[in-house]
Every structure is written in structure tokens, then in C-alpha cells.
Image (cartoon, helix red, strand yellow):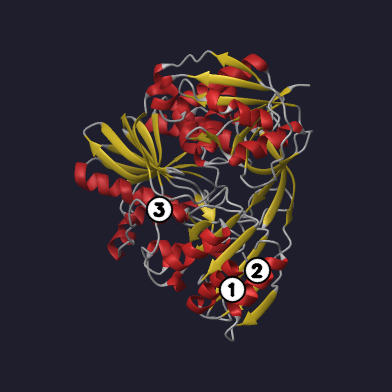
Amino acid sequence: MAEVLVVVESSGGTVKKVTLEMLTLARSLGEPAAVVLGAPGTAAALVDKLGEYGATKVYAAESAEIDEHLVAPKATALAQLVKAVSPAAVLIGSTQEGKEIAGRLAVKLDNGVLHDVVELAADGTATQVAFAGSTIVKSKVTKGLPLVTVRPNSLTPSPAAASPSVEQVEVALSDTDKLAVVTKRVAEAKGARPELTEASIVVSGGRGVGSAENFKVVEELADLLGAAVGASRAATDSGFYPHAFQVGQTGKTVSPQLYVALGISGAIQHRAGMQTSKTIVAVNKDTEAPIFELADFGVVGDLFQVVPQAAEEIRKRR
Amino acid sequence: MKIVVLVKQVPDSGAERNLRADDNTVDRASANNVINEMDEYAIEEALRLQEAHGGEVTVLTMGPDRATESIRKALSMGPDAAVHVLDDALAGTDALGTSKVLAAAIGELAPDLVIAGAESTDARGQVMPHMLAERLGYAALTGARKLTVEGSQLTVERQTEEGYEVVTAATPAIVSVWDTINEPRYPSFKGIMAAKKKPVATKSLADLQVPADQVGWTGATTTVLSHSKRPPRSAGQKVADSGDGGTALVEYLSSEKFV
């Protein structure tokens, strides 16, 4: 069976969930081989987890320069590997950097690329969700191998133990790979909360939350549910919550099991980022708010009454 | 500093958008076609750099005839000139082909800096700046929420999942920007009038020396097999809070096994 390359995303020595989802997908297409692109020593910490989800091989393309420069070195290392092993497909996470690597790889290999794929069949037919979740598109790469970026939370990762062999891959970079220099990486506190695009539950606040101070109500419910916190554009533009957490057309697209919309009217800008969520619940004062048109369960009421009561009820049930 | 801003005309994301039944391309005829929102931030950033450092700002668009409207709209914000890549053979061009065409057009203009929106609201691919950088051998500083220029040295704060990265490069470079970077100006009446007289150069594939069979339907490297509308979500249960709304909410979450 041909290898299916899965480009590993990790953070601080932990494999990201989207990678486990891609390994699960890769198992239905061929032999999953994980590709770690990073500084020397990155792969060692990840191998066990990658094996747990079925990686039969781990390619470690490690070089300090990969970490010191933006995107380009990763694409170069990956292109060299693709040429060497001729995989059946290449799966990359549909994150900012993942899409960027895929774009460069497409140029290097003169190979078609599909992004935001939610399903990939063995014959290479990809399913994409377009136009803010309103349209389902079936598409195919017609030149080269299936090179796709996979949208986080598109499938449920399932373990399938394997004992991967680790293969070190030589990384040969050119001067143009080193033009953009990363001088600093700054983590902004999100506390212990899960990452927005990967979270199974997202609790978001909108204009109705009213102030940055009041977002504590949103955060409290999120923490009780083990959820990530999101915000509508109205809330981020008003400075209630940092822009990085914006869900919507110009922010993050999320597709969690449960989406909780608090004080969010449900403008098309916001719906674009969340309407493929499995279950949606909403609390809003305005009974006419469009968010109720897509909510599986809605409470018309003051979120400052409803949400603290819900939080109390959850605590009681523990 | 010579700056090129990439502008894409897209169907308005605030209205219903469709793919055509015949050739699976974006239905532009029935849509309200507007400048990709993120591109307005790119134009604003270019104008601010021009105000601080001098130089010229050129808008670059690839698109059909009607993209002219978006080009004039872009020029009304303040850029000096525009290049419109217009060729019937471009219909059906995918991202990879588009990057080939835009790279050729940028190569001719030989700017110090190319600024683009971080993504378009229709395709949301985020691939174009790096595809162009790859083709042109430029540095790519993408996903910027802040850009500073000192001489030929560029520094951006790149928004990431965890926070941000500080990334530097020398010109020539391509920078893509998020909507957190600035607040785009509205075109003034004077700007709108002036835009009508600004030079818009039209370039064909032959002008750019891009072989027609490498773009359009013939050169496409991906294909859409079929498309369908996702069934709209239907409204579920809605209750008015009469003092027990929070409890009712948790009841529901519990019945769905979230609590």
C-alpha cells in the first residue's frame, strides 16, 4: 500500500488534534506516514502519539533553519520528501500555516491543491464546504497527487496502535527559503482552554455581552463545559475580547460538536464561521434574532440571568 | 517605495452566493460583486506607507470585464494607477494558474512591496501570497496584524494560533494583512472623481507572455465534479426565560450529553 503523508502540527511537544484526525483519514487511503517539520528533536516527543493513531512511519525533517524562517523551508523539505517517496496523497492541516505550506508545495510540484477538505475518498474525490457552509463541493486534483488541506474537526480521530519507525530526512535549503526570519514567538494567554478551531465545544459572546469585564460570564460557562471561548466581530471590534478569538467570515471558522452563542444576533458575518457546528444553542434577549433560525435550542432572555443560572445548574449536577 | 496591492473582486459575502450549474464556477452574474473586504485593509496599509515614505501605489487585479468597477472603487481610496489582467482565456483558472498570471504581472511592475489581503471571502484559500513568493523569489510575511518599514527592512507581527510571531525580511517582499491591521478609509467625493481619470492598464496573457494553455480550463490542475446546497439548518426549540431559562438550557445540554 502506498504511503499517505500527513504533515504533523504540534505545539510545545504535543501533537495537535487535527493531526490525529488526518492520521485517521489517512488510514482509509493507504499507509499513514507522519512528517515532522521542525527544529532538531521535535519528532522524538511526538512519535508515541503518532503511533497511537496509526502512523507506520515518522519522517523527521529536522533543522534549526526550519524553525528560524517562515513557511518556505517546510515546503522545501516536504517537496523533497514527496519527490523521494511518491506518496498516494499529502494531507496538511487547513490552518493558516498549513494552507501556506500547501500553496508553496503546489507551485514547487506543479500540482493542484484543494483546501478546507472535510472528506477524502480513496479515488481522490474531495468534499469541501464552501460559501460559509452553505454549499457542498465535490472536487478532485487533476494534475499530480491529491494534495489537500483538511479542515480541523471534520472527523473524529480514532486510535489504531502502530509502532512507527523513525526516518531522519536530510533538509537542503536554498537562500530564498531563508528570506523571512522569525525573530520572536509570543504566546498570548488563552489559559488552559482548548484551541478555538480544535475545541469540541465553543462558547461565544457577542455585542450583548456589553463589555470586556462582562466576558467573565462567557468564560465561566466555557470553563465549566471545557470549552474554548469565541467572540463575534461586534464584540472584538468593540474591544470586549481579543481579535484572535473572533469567529466569523473574517475570523476563525469553527465546527465543534456544540456551539453556544451568547448575546450574538447571528449576522451573516458570524454565521459564516459557525453554522457547520453539529449542535447550536443560543441565548439572546431579542426573540427575532436570526441566531434562533439556526439554533437547535434557544432561550429568549437576559444572558446575565440565564447563563449564571445555567452555570449553577451544571455545578449542581456534578 | 513602489507598492503593488492585490485586489480581487468577489461576490458579496453578506448575500447569498452560488456556484453556476453549467460550469461550476462562481456565479458572478447574479451576485453583488464587491472588493474582497480584506483587500481594503491592504490598500489602506499601502496608502499609509506611501504617506510616510513616498513612492507609488498600483492596484493589480485579474478578473473579467466587470472587475473594472472594483478597480475604480479601489482607486477612489487613493492609489495612483491600476493594472487589470483581462483575457477570455482566463475563465476557469484555478489558484495555481492565477499565481502564474499574477506573478508575471508583478514581475513586470518590479515593486519593492506587494500587499494582499490575508484571504478572500469567496475561496478563503490563503495560498496566493506564498504561491507568488515561491514564483517570484520574494520574501513572504503573511497574516500580518502590524507592519513596520525602515528603509528596505520590513517587520511584521504575524497572528498565529498561539499568539503572534515577529518576522522580518528585506524588500522585495509580499505581505498579507488581516483586518486587525488598520481601519480602511472611505473614499472621498474628490477621490471618487479623481479615480475616473487614473490610468488603468489592461494586460492580456500575450502581453504577460503567459501561454494560454497554462491557465483557464485547459491549464486547470483541479476540477469541481459537482456541487449542491447544504440543507439549511432548521430552527429548533425556543423557550422564553421565565426565571428558569438557565435550567432549561442545561436540561437540553444534558439530554444531548454535553453536561
User: Could you say whether the residue bearing mark 3 is in a helix, strand or loop?
Assistant: loop
Amino acid at circle 3: Asp
To which quarter of the image does residue B93 belong?
Answer: top right
Residue farthest to the bottom, as pictured: B242
Image position of A167 (left or right of B43): right
Foreground residue, B174 or B237?
Answer: B237
Image position of B92 (left or right of B140): right
Report, in whole angstroms, how far the alpha carbon at label 1 lies from the one at label 2: 8 Å
Foreground residue, B196 or B133?
Answer: B133
Q: Which mark is residue B179?
A: 3
User: Could you say whether the residue bearing mark 1 is in a helix, strand or loop?
Assistant: helix
Amino acid at circle 2: Leu
Report the residue at 54% width, 69% height from top: A311
To which quarter of the image does residue B148 belong?
Answer: top left
Residue A187 horizontal/vertical position (percent): 39, 42
Q: Would you place residue B27 above or below residue A147 in this image?
A: below
Report, in whole angstroms, how far the alpha carbon at label 1 lies from the one at label 3: 25 Å
Q: Would you place residue B233 above or below residue B160 in this image?
A: below
Q: Which mark is residue A294?
A: 2
